[in-house]
Image (cartoon, rainbow, N blue to C red):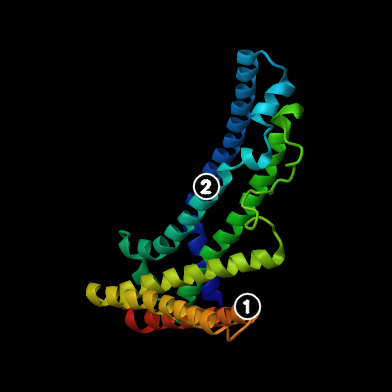
């Protein structure tokens, strides 16, 4: 446990600066996009009034008022970019140890004790980054709402759209504990799958690694599609029972991914 905590702390320190820079850049872009949307909308209304010589109320009937969900539409794109960054980091957290000048991976592999601490320290680091990213995005989303409310003129604002999360990645930012748990579980599943593929690639020669990676991707997808097609055709299970079956299969495959990854790290990857 002590080794696991030390390795996790080391992984966090190695990633902290880059993570802070990425988060700050994304937050600035998101808040700047709200300012830009408000300014663009106001200029659009003013230009319409000037060209058509109408009042603000008549102009807004044609152009419509601006709601927060529309002003913060760029948040969705930044969230997707954030997800892509997490996926890249989940790959990079392993390869940087092999590709760096110091070959840090060899120092890790020569540490006394179980190598499982290496795997779980990296998994924990990525998981903590995901949790903090969701939390920070939530704070930025809330801050953006107050910024929007402060910037926009009352008559230009869509009063029916006052919620900070309405129609803006609504499912992603409900902060309902069940929804949040599902999001984190899916994230952990995807990261574990990426770890497995990386360790397979590091454990075998190129040709054999490609075949094994292909099997790890094809077999679960084919089985899932086959099971769903069979259940849909036969109506053997109710919709809720099918959902529980899929959750059970996902848990089984998650356990398999962890077991296989640890086995590869212990037996196939050598100094």
Left or right relative to 176: residue 184: left
Tell me the residue at 63%/78% (across/down): 239
Report crowding for label 1: few under 14, some 14 to 19, many 20 or more residues within 10 A (C-alpha): few
Identify the residue position indicated by label 1 in the image.
239
Q: Out of 232 and 146, give the one closest to the viewer.
A: 232
- Image quadrant containing the C terminus: bottom left
Tell me the residue at 30%/59% (across/down): 101
Residue 57: horizontal and vertical position, in percent? 74, 23
* Above-or-below relation of 56 to 37: above
Q: Out of 16 and 192, give the one closest to the viewer.
A: 192
In which image quadrant can residue 148 be found?
top right
Residue 136: horizontal and vertical position, in percent? 62, 51
Q: For mark 1, give the secondary structure.
A: helix
Q: Out of 254 and 165, give the one closest to the viewer.
A: 165
Identify the residue position indicated by label 2 in the image.
77
Tell me the residue at 56%/39% (across/down): 28
Tell me the residue at 46%/54% (across/down): 85
Left or right relative to 11: residue 203: left
Report crowding for label 2: few under 14, some 14 to 19, many 20 or more residues within 10 A (C-alpha): few
Residue 156: horizontal and vertical position, in percent? 71, 28
* Above-or-below relation of 53 to 188: above
- Image quadrant containing the N terminus: bottom right
Left or right relative to 84: residue 178: right
Residue 260: horizontal and vertical position, in percent? 42, 82
Q: What separation in Å lies between label 1 and label 2 (alpha carbons)?
A: 32 Å
């Amino acid at each position: 446990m002590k080794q696991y905590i030390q390795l996790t702390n080391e992984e966090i320190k190695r990633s902290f600066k880059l993570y802070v820079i990425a988060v700050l850049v994304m937050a600035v872009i998101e808040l700047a996009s709200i300012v830009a949307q408000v300014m663009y909308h106001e200029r659009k209304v003013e230009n319409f009034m000037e060209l058509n010589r109408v009042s603000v109320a008549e102009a807004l009937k044609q152009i419509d008022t601006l709601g927060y969900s529309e002003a913060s539409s760029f948040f969705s794109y930044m969230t997707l970019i954030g997800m892509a960054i997490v996926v890249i980091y989940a790959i990079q957290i392993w390869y940087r140890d092999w590709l760096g000048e110091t070959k840090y991976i060899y120092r890790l592999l020569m540490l006394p004790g179980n190598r499982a601490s290496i795997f779980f320290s990296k998994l924990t680091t990525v998981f903590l980054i995901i949790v903090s990213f969701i939390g920070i995005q939530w704070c930025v989303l809330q801050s953006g709402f107050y910024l929007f409310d402060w910037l926009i003129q009352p008559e230009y604002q869509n009063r029916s759209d006052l919620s900070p999360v309405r129609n803006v990645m609504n499912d992603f930012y409900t902060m309902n504990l069940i929804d949040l748990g599902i999001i984190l579980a899916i994230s952990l599943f995807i990261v574990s799958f990426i770890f497995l593929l990386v360790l397979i690639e590091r454990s075998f020669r190129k040709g054999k690694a490609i075949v094994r990676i292909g099997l790890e991707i094809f077999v679960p997808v084919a089985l899932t599609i086959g099971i769903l097609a069979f259940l849909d055709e036969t109506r053997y299970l109710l919709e809720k029972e099918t959902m529980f079956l899929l959750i059970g299969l996902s848990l089984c495959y998650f356990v398999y991914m962890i077991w296989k990854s640890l086995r590869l790290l212990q037996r196939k990857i050598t100094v």
